[in-house]
Image: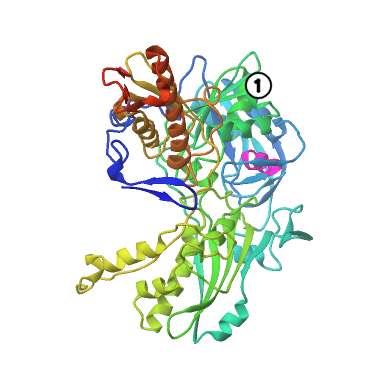
Amino acid sequence: MTTIDNESNVVLATNTDFKVVGTRPVRHDGTDKVTGRALYGADYDASGLLHGKILRSPHAHALIKSVNTSKAESLDGVKAVVTASDFPQVADKTVALGEDDTKLKWLRDNILASDKALYGGHAIAGVAAANPHIAEEALKLIEVEYEVLPAVLTTQEAMADNASILHKSLTTQELGEDTGVVSNVASHFQHVKGDVAKGFAEADIVKEREFNTTTVHQGYIEPHNGTAFWSADGRLHVWCSTQGSFVVRDSLADLLDLPVSMVRVTPMEIGGGFGGKIPIYVEPVAALLSKKTGAPVKIVMSRKETFEGSGPTPGSYMKIKIGAKRDGTITAAHAWMAMEAGAYPGSPVGAAAQCVFSTYDLENALIDGYDVVVNKPKTAAYRAPGAPNAAFGAEQVINELAEELQMDPIEFRLKNVAVEGTRRPDGPTFRRIGAKEVLEAMRDHPHYQSKKQVGQGRGVAIGFWFNIGFDSACNIAVNSDGSVNLTEGSTDIGGSRTSIAMHAAEVLGIPVEDVHPSVVDTDTVGFTAVTGGSRTTFATGWAAYEAAQDVKQQCLDRAASIWDVDVDGLQMEDGVISSTADSELKMTLK
């Protein structure tokens, strides 16, 4: 069945219309991964390769009074030592990080601390040596003088009146305006819909609860890694496991004051990411060491370093208040959410605010969001960053309301669920959302209708996330044997190269096994945003779809030229080009 969305004029197809999409082919990367032949970042090797190690702060908060590297530099086998002073001193600016942005100074200081160590595990210096053991010994010879300061480890500690301040230059942005007040609160924003005070006054029942969540690391099986080689012509080439090779390229160009054309990044296979492989950590240090030594330098974090020196999801403190009438109609909702950004601004509280009440059609809602710096590693994405925290709080209160109102938790949600045309508290209006249909399917499912056994529970919750969009690029080339080469810029997590290949195969009418996808370096394909934000299958798949449509049209045009017929009378199905007027005119890709 095929239908048309009348509002967007987009053709909507079901699985019955597809021959490739919706099937379960063998993953293109499967054989290499299960046989151990796939190459990850730590597997990269090169002639003359040096090994890098990083010295990290033992203190959660400390002034760096001095760093003396002379003893380390004199150790036999040590080729170079770098600190924050080795970075080019370029003007501060806002730089993109894939799913968000930050100041260049904060990005640089998170990679190698300059004046302050802001969390236990904060990188202080990097060493390149002939082997990893010498590099480890050299780290012990670096002398760092610290002045230890009080640390703040939660949003509540950081927001207290007498809290130790992480950044003397950080002033709070209050509803978009700079207050000039130095604090650990980077920003406070609000989303307002309707009149919340009026809504709570109309409620027959109000529930308000407080929630604390703690820091959780993504726990990917492969540690962060990076190999850099600064060649004689001034070009920097980096090999790493990343969710965004162009993010790495652009960040390195910003940090090292290079044109992006002078940086080439080759993505390796990724042993898990979940959002945590979007930021960069060791790649710039390897690049600085390579520049000093003239040799390729590889750095691979240990498991301990990965936990201490890379970004987890944020801890949070939330207050959720929801009011409802006796008939189950929600009259008002207020979310107060403070989220840990880690050592530098940029928690996912903005995304949390977009998600917290978006599954409901609310007349009155108020959302307060606070981005708070604490003495922990700078947070990174982790599977819909901010949304699980928000849903944890909001859905608990929703369930308590349903219980007190003696309503089925699904029916209570259905009475208030967001539908097409609902305006979210943060502004956008939903088109097709499907939340109502999902809840109805849950309610009607035999599992939900079945009687619970002794000791068995059954919980209900609903959440929201969004597609971040952004750019993707694909190239398709047809081989003489009828197969096609598909090059793409989306690094593969979860088999995305196969799902993208399926888009191309569907359009061209060929088996997905005849599509050979490759995730290539930043010199070989057009700009492609991160593998994250629930965008890859849609955005890069769309690029593959458009590229395949272009190839299909070129095939039709060439066949029309060969047969000297009008191209409008030709069709291409199942990899066969044929004439609708002359059944004798047929041509296959093979």
Q: Residue furthest right?
A: 180
In this view, the residue farthest toward the front is: 581
Q: Is residue 271 left or right of residue 362?
A: left
Residue 104 counted in the magenta span: yes
Residue found 67% across the figure and 62% down from its top? 188
- Badge 1: few (under 14), some or many (20 or more) residues near its Cα, within 10 Å? some
Residue shown at 73%/41% (left/top)? 93
Amino acid at dot 1:
Lys
Query: Camera-side residue: 304 or 499?
Result: 499
Judging depth in this view, the residue of 538 and 128 nearest the camera is 538
Q: In this rendering, is residue 158 above or below 205?
A: above
Q: Is residue 494 above or below residue 523?
A: below
Horizontal side of 488 relative to 581 (left or right) equals: right
**Residue 203 visible at all:** yes
State which region is magenta.
Answer: 103-112
Name above or below for residue 200 compared with residue 432. below
Q: Residue at x 51, y 31 (%)?
A: 473
Give the quarter of the image for residue 392: bottom left
The answer to which image quadrant residue 332 occupies is: bottom right
Which of the image's four quarters has the C terminus?
top left
Where residue 74 appears, x then y in whole percent?
64, 23
Residue name at image x 68 percent, y 33 percent:
254
Residue 348 location, x and y as percent?
56, 54
Label 1 element class: helix
Inspect the magenta stretch and tell me whether residue 376 lies in it: no
Magenta part, dominant SS: helix
Q: Which residue is mark 1?
A: 292
Whole-percent x and y of residue 158? 64, 62
Closest to the observer, 254 or 401 = 401
Q: Position of residue 573 (x, y in %)?
A: 31, 29
Q: Number of numbered discs present?
A: 1
Question: For this view, does 358 lie left or right of residue 453?
Answer: right
